[in-house]
Each structure stands twice: as structure tokens, then as C-alpha cells.
Amino acid sequence: MKKSRSRAKIRKAVIPAAGLGTRFLPFSKAVPKEMLPIVDKPSIQYIVEEAVASGIEEVILVTSRGKSTVEDHFDISYELEDTLAKRGKTELLKTVQKVSRMIRLISVRQKEPLGLGHAVLCAREALGDEPFAVILPDDLIDSTVPGIKQLIKEYSQSGKAVVALEDVPDSRVHLYGIVKAVEVKKRLYRIKHVVEKPKLKDAPSNLAIIGRYVLPPEILEILARLKPGKGGEIQLTDALQKLADRKILYGYKFRGIRYDSGDKLGFLQANVVYGLKRPDLRERFREILEKELSK
Ligand code: UTP
């Protein structure tokens, strides 16, 4: 059977990483926050690994001035590989080679931080006319089925745009895009309205959009025509509302736990959780934590 165009395979993922990262100053002044380590890998590597594990074939990284270390991380480092090979460090060599060879990665520049919607629009030429994924590098998802893969599965069934949803506590509603939605089947919602960072009293629910999206190519047309919204930025949320108006926006309550590594506490929590999962570190790390907590 011929596949309809709307169910085209999701081959490309945009990773917008051109923000200023103000929550992580002063660290993020000269080093991109995407390079912050979670145990021994930069947080962005977990994101690219999630894309690979979800069947994505090409990553489009949206960067800005001062972010070249992110590009370098995924590049081949002949000198380093040569030195490791000569020293017989086979395991380390494999680890380093894996990073640079795991996926085709191209980068595009966002010259000014004009908003997340604008960052996605910067990937337009590279995306062409096919549906695509967007993965926000701050949101690390620890799950059995990779986060974006769960959305791709939903998309492949409905052919409709789908975003990841999570219930957030009242105290954090003002930090997210919050939806008004109706549940259409277990975990799946049709989204009617999206409100960007509302005050609690204006929030239509506690269901927040978090950083995973599968979007149709027409969202790029919508973004291109959008006027600046909240904070003077081109907001992805405003474009999502237009999809909701056309009744083609869905939300999926993903299975897994998310850590916001762009926030100080979320970053510390992710390091504790991922550290405790590492077989080579677990026991000693637990002892250290227990000792510190008993002081
Ligand atoms: P945030 O709103 O979290 O902003 O962006 P930020 O700059 O990353 O961090 P804070 O809040 O100042 O600490 C959400 C995502 O959108 C990207 C960011 O890199 C992040 O992945 N983004 C945001 C862009 O790529 N360009 C922009 O103009 C704005």
C-alpha cells in the first residue's frame, strides 16, 4: 500500500540551542549550557542519542555565536583519535568515535535570539517539505521508549501534529506553555488552546507542553508569517495555536521522567539520578551522598 504524504517518515529533528541560557549564568557566559556534563557526557549528547534511538537520520542543530564547542563535540577529532590509538586506549577511542559518527548533523545559525519559533524557522531550508521532530536540549527524558519515539509513534498513527505533555504543579505553571485539551484516548489529548507562561489564575489546566514535538511542514509557513508575541519573541506556542485552530494539534502524556537540565536544580537532580544508574559509579556515589546527607 502506498503511504500517504501526511504519514511520511520522520527523518529530521531540529535541536534549537541558540538561546542565551540566562538561568545558568555565569557558567553560560562563555560555555554553552548544552555542554554541561550529566556525569561524563554533555547534556546535548543524551538528546542526540535519543534522536538516533528514535530512528532520526539527520539532526539540524540551531546555534548562535559562541556555541561552536557543541558542533566540535560531534565532529571527528583526528588528533585525539590518533593519540588514543597510539596509546592503546581502545575503549576510550571507541567512545570518542561513536560520538562523531552516530548521525548526520548539520548546523544553522540563528543570528539573534528572536525566540524558539524563530529558531525552528532558521532550520526551514534544511527541513524542506516534510514533517519533522523538534527536541529541546534542556529536557532530558529518562524512559524505556525514547521520548521523541513515543511521539513519532502517535504521529505515524494519526498523521497529526503532536507535542509532549506533562502535569506540572501549580507553582510551575507560569514557566510553561499550558494547554486546554480533551482526552481522546489514554494519554492522548486534542489540544484546543495553548497559553504561553500563564499566571496560575489564567491557566486552563496543569498540562504543560515540554520539549518534544512532531510537526507538519506547514508550521514553517505559519512561523514565517507570525508577528512577535510574548516577550517580543517569535513564539512556537503561537504557531501551535494556529494548528489547534485547524484541529490538527494533539498532545501525548509521555511515559518517563523529565529533568530540566537548563535549570540549576534540575541539572543537579539529573546528575544524581544518572550517576546512581551508572554501574561503575553507583556504589561509591551512593556512599558519598549518604555521608554528605548525614552531616
Ligand atoms: P529558553 O526559553 O529555555 O531560553 O529556550 P534559554 O536561552 O535556553 O535559557 P534561559 O531561560 O535564558 O536560561 C528554550 C529553547 O529554545 C532555544 C533555547 O536554546 C532552548 O533550547 N532558543 C530560545 C533558541 O534556540 N533561540 C531563541 O531565540 C530562544
Image (tube, rainbow, N blue to C red):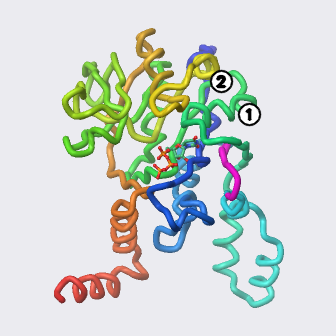
**Where is residue 207 drawn, in percent x and y?**
27, 33
* Magenta part, dominant SS: strand
**Where is residue 1 drawn, in percent x and y?**
60, 14
Q: Toward which corner of the image does residue 129 lie, by quadrant? A: top right
- The residue sitting at 39% across, 40% down in the picture is 210
**Where is residue 49 drawn, in percent x and y?**
56, 55
Residue on which disc 1 sits: 126
Image: magenta residue range:
59-66
Q: Is residue 37 left or right of residue 112?
A: left
Instruction: Give the SS element for disc 2.
Output: loop
Closer to the camera: disc 1 or disc 2?
A: 1
Q: Is residue 178 left or right of residue 13?
A: left
Q: Residue furthest left?
A: 294
Residue on which disc 2 sits: 130
Q: Toward which corner of the image does residue 117 lie, by quadrant? A: top right
* Neighbours of disc 1 within 10 Å: few (<14), some (14-19), many (20+): some
Comparing 119 with 87, the one in front is 119
Question: Identity of the amino acid at label 1?
Answer: Ala
Q: Residue furthest front?
A: 232
